[in-house]
């Protein structure tokens, strides 16, 4: 028999005070409650609507078993907060309204998740049932989302109105996380606490705290005090010391605060790469002994821990020992991504290790490194998780993988029976702009690879959104990047594969904005207001504009006519000029975000047929086979969807103009950004032909430029046909080739890695 405690009104009389003493007004509010639009996020697995509304107020009697005292108190304290408008104690009518919390071993759910719960609301009774306290707490969080703002009551008084529903709920994925990089930029503990509050509200349960990086080390390690004195600080571009660290007490408080919200904090201590800040303080653990500085730049850096040096492992074990003292998580994240092998290739100690251990190459040395660390973690009762690079050179049986370079690593890990957290750059990177990852894109995320056999699905334990902070200098910026997109992922990971209707999600989300404001969250936009698309017919290229949210309006104008009024978009229009198109979205008559500016070029090759000898890379498809002839130019953001990328391959395409045309010049735009391993071609070559058999070589052009700095460049490389000729040649076919530089050149941190070649638009004049 479950023993219920009746909470006497006398105990709570001093707290439970009337929310609203005017019953007539109450009735009006009740009638205004929009029971058709249930605002819950994440949306429950199953929800049936009933009749009527239950108002949570001081007249409610609570019943709960003793072991749920904490949960019940939390619920009641939240309700007491609702009663700020009146100081009148309420006289209860015994038994009219009840709220029951029931912990039951007999609770049956379609899921065996400990987070499962059932919630039944009628106009007189609320019943929350679960097998575990955690399930009860999840149900309470659902109850607390029925606030007046979210339920659509715009009354001044704040209250909880519960529409009659029957909810059966549980999460699809057990791991629902946010990665926060506090290294590239440092954020105060209070920011982390604010995020934990928001995560709790949306039933997220993992904070992945990225604590060490090339640019800063954020945790004190008693045995190695220089990690705070030196590694926590970089000199910024103005010569100022930038950085900081959390004290151990602060870190303990963060863990406590998270635990109270059912959130696990998984610390990430990066190794063997992304470790330059630590090596600046302790260069004896690098391959060549330094000197090394804490990095003040973004990218992948060459200094990594020496794998041949046993003292490196002693250092890391000491560090991890102190990390485990603070963080009780089952998993410890050890990074493992983006470790250039250059130093290892040239280090006698690392080479000796490879020889002694019979390791075939530096990838196997990385595997040795990771597995040695894993044995240490296992010995201490913990499990290792790392980025998908830890698959290279062999993965130990108990390690878990976080897939970031697409889904493939995660798929491979699941097929070999490793637990997997999915956070591919395609959907989960919150540092990416809204042009590439907006809210709708996140909401469309499918954590299960489509070609993964069902027997392995359960190895995908969940996902994370990754908030890297290279370009996020402050809290306001951070808020605007994390919110509302994180909430989209919270919904996916809890509700998947149900509730995939974005319009419905967006309708619910708008109800939550006042709640975010109350939490002090400076949330950003959901998307860039409009997308510029194209339609191709035989004779013309049409430009289409699409609003990216149902409640927006879209206007446009050509830049050369920016003195004229904006035009409301009605239907697709022809591309017939070389100009920049400006597009502005409006929401409720107000500009929504900045104008979007897109350059177009009108030329003879538009919409012609292009055949590729080498396929583009699946990560950078651009506009597929139309990319080079769509007239739409790639911007300085190489992820803008206009650039076509080739990895380790040359570009070799032939364009068929359909008929003989005089050719004045042929050229294309190329991209260079050394930090992302993208380089201008070594050489371009243009050939023309009337019949695709006999080819006439126009000039070849060799590129001398090879900027290894972190600047982004676009370069137009072209060939004129008429130099030294009397007549302008005619051609139907144009063969355009560009040669990849091969490997990232020496002198760059990523030297020796395969380089990218990025192209957009072959302009034929
Ligand atoms: C990563 O984004 N380098 C894991
Ligand atoms: Zn070494």
Image (cartoon, helix red, strand yellow):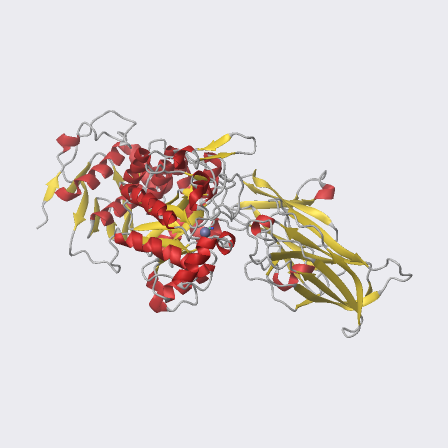
Looking at the image, which residue sits at the far top?
87
622 sits to left or right of 179: right
The C terminus sits in image quarter: bottom right
Residue 668 locus on image (x, y percent): 71, 56
**Identity of the residue furthest to the left in this view:** 1
Task: Point out the residue furthest to the right here.
Answer: 726
The residue closer to the viewer here, 708 or 20, is 708
**Is 584 placed left or right of 166 in the picture?**
right
**Residue 526 or residue 486, whichever sits in front:** 486
Instruction: Left or right? Give the position of 730 relative to 456.
Output: right
Name the one closer to the observer, 453 or 77.
453
The location of residue 143, given as percent across then percent down, is 28, 44
Front in this rendered view, residue 113 or 750: 750
**Camera sees residue 596:** yes
**How many numbered discs?**
0
Residue 654 % position (x, y): 71, 67
Residue 507 in view in this figure: no
Q: Does residue 693 sit above or below 633 in this rendering? A: below
Using the rendered view, name the quadrant where residue 218 is placed: top left
For residue 21, which quarter of the picture? top left
Q: Residue at x 70, y 63 (%)?
A: 737
Residue 398 locus on image (x, y percent): 31, 59
Q: Is residue 731 above or below residue 258?
A: below
Q: Quadrant of residue 450?
A: bottom left
């Amino acid at each position: 028999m479950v023993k219920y405690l009746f909470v006497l009104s006398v105990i709570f009389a001093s707290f439970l005070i009337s929310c609203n003493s005017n019953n007539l007004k109450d009735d009006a509010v009740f009638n205004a409650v929009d029971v058709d639009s249930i605002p819950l996020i994440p949306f429950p697995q199953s929800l049936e609507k009933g009749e009527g509304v239950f108002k949570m107020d001081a007249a409610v009697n609570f019943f709960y078993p003793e072991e749920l005292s904490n949960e019940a108190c939390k619920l009641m304290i939240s309700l007491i907060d609702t009663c700020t408008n009146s100081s009148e104690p309420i006289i209860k009518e015994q038994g009219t309204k009840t709220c029951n919390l029931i912990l039951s071993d007999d609770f049956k759910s379609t899921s065996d998740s400990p987070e499962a719960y059932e919630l039944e609301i009628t106009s007189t009774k609320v019943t929350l049932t679960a097998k575990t306290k955690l399930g009860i707490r999840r149900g309470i969080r659902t109850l607390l989302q029925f606030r007046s703002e979210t339920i659509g009551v715009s009354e001044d008084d704040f209250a909880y109105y519960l529409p009659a529903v029957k909810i059966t709920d549980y999460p699809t994925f057990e791991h629902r996380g946010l990665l926060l990089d506090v290294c590239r930029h440092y954020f105060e503990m209070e920011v982390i606490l604010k995020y934990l509050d928001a995560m709790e509200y949306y039933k997220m349960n993992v904070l992945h705290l990225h604590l060490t990086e090339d640019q800063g080390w954020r945790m004190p390690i008693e045995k190695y005090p220089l990690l705070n004195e030196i590694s926590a600080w970089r000199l910024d571009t103005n010569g100022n010391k930038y950085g900081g660290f959390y004290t151990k007490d602060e870190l303990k408080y963060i863990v406590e605060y998270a635990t109270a919200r059912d959130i696990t904090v998984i610390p990430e201590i990066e190794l063997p790469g992304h470790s330059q800040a630590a090596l600046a303080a302790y260069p004896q653990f690098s391959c060549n002994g330094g000197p090394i500085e804490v990095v003040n730049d973004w990218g992948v850096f060459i200094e990594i821990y020496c794998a041949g040096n046993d003292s490196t492992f002693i250092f890391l074990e000491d560090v991890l020992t102190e990390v485990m003292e603070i963080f009780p998580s089952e998993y410890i994240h050890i990074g493992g991504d983006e470790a250039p092998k250059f130093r290892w290739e040239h280090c006698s100690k690392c080479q000796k290790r490879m020889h002694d251990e019979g390791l075939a190459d530096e990838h196997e040395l990385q595997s040795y490194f990771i597995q040695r660390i894993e044995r240490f973690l296992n010995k201490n009762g913990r499990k290792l998780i790392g980025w998908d690079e830890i698959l290279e050179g062999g993965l130990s049986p108990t390690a878990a993988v976080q897939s970031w370079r697409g889904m493939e690593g995660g798929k491979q890990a699941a097929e070999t029976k490793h637990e997997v957290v999915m956070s591919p750059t395609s959907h989960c990177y919150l540092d990416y702009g809204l042009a590439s990852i907006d809210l709708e894109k996140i909401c469309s995320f499918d954590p299960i690879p489509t070609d993964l056999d069902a027997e392995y699905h359960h190895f995908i334990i969940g996902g994370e959104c990754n908030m890297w902070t290279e370009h996020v200098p402050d809290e306001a910026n951070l808020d605007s990047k994390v919110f509302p997109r994180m909430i989209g992922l919270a919904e996916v990971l809890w509700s998947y594969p149900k509730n995939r209707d974005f319009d419905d999600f967006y309708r619910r989300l708008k109800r939550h904005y006042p709640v975010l404001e109350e939490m002090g969250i400076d949330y950003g936009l959901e998307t860039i207001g409009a997308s510029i698309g194209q339609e191709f017919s035989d004779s013309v290229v049409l430009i289409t504009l699409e609003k990216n949210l149902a409640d927006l309006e879209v206007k446009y104008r050509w830049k050369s006519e920016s003195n004229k009024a904006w035009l409301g978009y009605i239907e697709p229009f022809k591309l017939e000029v070389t100009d920049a198109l400006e597009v502005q979205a409006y929401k409720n008559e107000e500009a929504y975000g900045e104008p979007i500016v897109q350059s177009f070029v009108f030329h003879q090759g538009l919409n012609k047929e292009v055949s590729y000898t080498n396929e583009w890379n699946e990560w950078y498809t651009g506009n597929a086979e139309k990319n080079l002839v769509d007239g739409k130019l790639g911007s300085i953001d190489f992820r803008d969807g206009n650039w076509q990328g080739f990895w380790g391959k040359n570009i070799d395409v032939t364009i068929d103009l359909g008929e003989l045309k005089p050719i004045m010049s042929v050229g294309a735009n190329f991209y260079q950004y050394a930090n992302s391993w993208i380089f201008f071609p070594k050489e371009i070559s243009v050939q023309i032909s009337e019949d695709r058999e006999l080819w006439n070589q126009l000039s070849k052009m060799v590129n001398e430029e090879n900027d290894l700095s972190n600047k982004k460049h676009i370069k137009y490389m072209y060939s004129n046909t008429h130099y030294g000729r009397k007549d302008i040649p005619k051609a139907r076919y144009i063969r355009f080739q560009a040669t990849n530089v091969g490997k990232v050149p020496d002198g760059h941190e990523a030297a020796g890695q395969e380089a990218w070649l990025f192209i957009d638009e072959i302009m034929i004049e």
